[in-house]
Amino acid sequence: MKKFRHQFFNNKNNSLKKKLLLITLLFGFYNLNAQVKFRIEPGFLLKTESENLGLMFNIEPNIEISNNCVIGLRFGLALNPQKIENNDSSQFFIDDENDNAVLSFMPTFDYYLNENHIRPYLGLGLGYYLFSSEEIAISSGDVTEGNVNNQLGLLLRGGFEWRKTKIGLEYNFIPKADIKIQNNQTIGTVNNSYFGISIGFLIGGGKSTR
């Protein structure tokens, strides 16, 4: 009987602990979900050499870690930012008229200069940029693919936020990358650094108090 009571209370305590743990996890998830804000930021590129329109689109969940500091994780797409240098235009033709894209993934940090309704901010990020391949025409008449190595790059940005709207100017610094064909020959370089201007909209995170 004594053993049975011991097992009964032990199982009861374990069940209570599991329930408390579940409640704690659910509360923590709800609290985190209430703090996480998602921003979508469509925009366009400035000063590109492409004949096609330069566009950008960012998605960024972020969390306020203080009244003035915000951390986030940005997923970005830039369309037609490339500036191409051809080492031998008599032998190779690099097609820079078709649309090309750069994908980026990076943690970010923003600092807001005040806590007013209109809040100027400065921000930075460091992350990875992924490039699309290039179509190369050779003087012999053959067509091949030019591979471009992905790069680690730096994001600098600033702007202002009003309630759930954010207008920003950003510069993505990306080191020049070699364009190589199948025999590993370097035939040129591509510069994917770009300026962009965007307007962002807040999704989730509850009502804005500012």
Image (cartoon, helix red, strand yellow):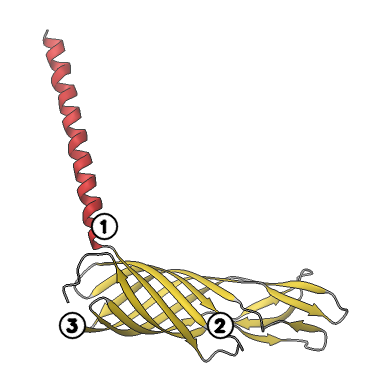
Q: What's the distance in space between the residues labelled 3 and 1, CA to CA?
A: 24 Å
| Residue sitting at x 31%, y 80% | 166
Placement of 128 over or under 176, stated as above or below: above
Where does the C terminus fall, quadrant-wise? bottom left
Are dots 3 and 1 in contact, CB under 8 Å? no
Q: Which residue is mark 2?
A: 81
Which residue is nearer to you in this view: 173 or 138? 138
Q: Which secondary structure, mark 2? A: loop
Q: Neighbour class for label 1 at 10 Å: few (<14), some, many (≥20)?
A: some
Q: Which secondary structure, mark 1? A: helix
Horizontal side, residue 86 vs residue 78: left or right:
right
Are dots 2 and 1 in contact, CB under 8 Å? no
Q: What's the distance in space between the residues labelled 2 and 1, CA to CA?
A: 35 Å
Residue 167 placement (x, y as % from top left): 33, 83
Q: Counting residues from the N terminus, which is met first, the one under dot 3 or under dot 1?
A: 1
Q: Which residue is mark 3?
A: 117
| Residue sitting at x 16%, y 83% | 116
Residue 6 placement (x, y as % from top left): 14, 16
Placement of 166 over or under 104, stated as above or below: below
Amino acid type of disc 1?
A: Asn
- Tell me which corner region of the image, top left, top right, bottom left or bottom right, holds residue 12: top left
Residue 68 placement (x, y as % from top left): 22, 76
Q: Which mark is residue 33?
A: 1
| Residue sitting at x 30%, y 71% | 202
Q: Counting residues from the N terminus, which is met first, the one under dot 2 or under dot 1?
A: 1
Amino acid type of disc 3?
A: His
| Residue sitting at x 25%, y 73% | 69
